């Protein structure tokens, strides 16, 4: 048995090891008013870096999303917003980010504008985090 390299989790704490691209799409499509978060985390990193390599999605009340990713140290922590509701084409912007990140592609960030996230100045997750 091989060690998982990727773990998906929702805000209920349910996890999936090494989800396929189809699994990731299904998990994202399943976000709703009761299940708002999806986190993909790299777990094939050195133990001291666990929890520092991830991409996550939060669904807003209007079905737009906030994405966040961290690639190691705090100075490599970014966020982006998709102002188009998922059911009106927003998923066409979000899904390629999730799949590209999970697959380790170099160009996964290309479709969105990313800004550095400063936890001392903002909370893009609103009351959720």
Image (spheres, grey):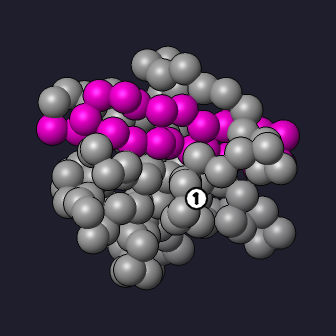
Q: Residue at x 30, y 68 (%)?
A: 35
Q: Position of residue 89 (x, y in %)?
A: 19, 27
Q: Residue at x 40, y 30 (%)?
A: 82
Q: Which residue is mark 1?
A: 42
Q: Is residue 66 above or below residue 12?
A: above
Q: Is residue 49 above or below residue 59?
A: below
Q: Can I make out residue 53 in this image?
A: yes
Q: Position of residue 1 (x, y in %)?
A: 44, 80
Drawn side of residue 62 relative to residue 78, left or right = left
Q: Can I make out residue 18 in this image?
A: no
103 magenta-colored: no
Q: Position of residue 19 (x, y in %)?
A: 33, 62
Q: Which residues are magenta?
A: 64-87
Q: Quadrant of the C terminus?
A: bottom right
Under circle 1, the secondary element is strand
Front residue of 124 and 40: 124
Q: Residue at x 59, y 47 (%)?
A: 124
Q: Position of residue 30 (x, y in %)?
A: 20, 60
Q: Is residue 20 above or below residue 76?
A: below
Front residue of 105 and 34: 34
Front residue of 75 and 87: 87
């Amino acid at each position: 048995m091989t060690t998982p390299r990727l773990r998906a989790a929702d805000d209920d704490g349910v996890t999936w090891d090494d989800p396929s691209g189809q699994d990731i799409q299904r998990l994202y499509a399943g976000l709703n008013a009761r299940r708002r978060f999806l986190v993909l985390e790299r777990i094939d990193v050195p133990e001291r870096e666990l929890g520092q390599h991830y991409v996550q999605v939060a669904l807003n009340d209007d079905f737009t999303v906030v994405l966040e990713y961290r690639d190691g140290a705090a100075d490599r922590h970014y966020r982006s917003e998709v102002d188009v509701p998922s059911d009106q084409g927003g998923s066409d912007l979000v899904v390629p980010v999730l799949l590209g990140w999970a697959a380790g592609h170099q160009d996964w960030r290309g479709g969105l504008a990313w800004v550095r996230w400063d936890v001392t100045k903002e909370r893009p997750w609103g009351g959720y985090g």
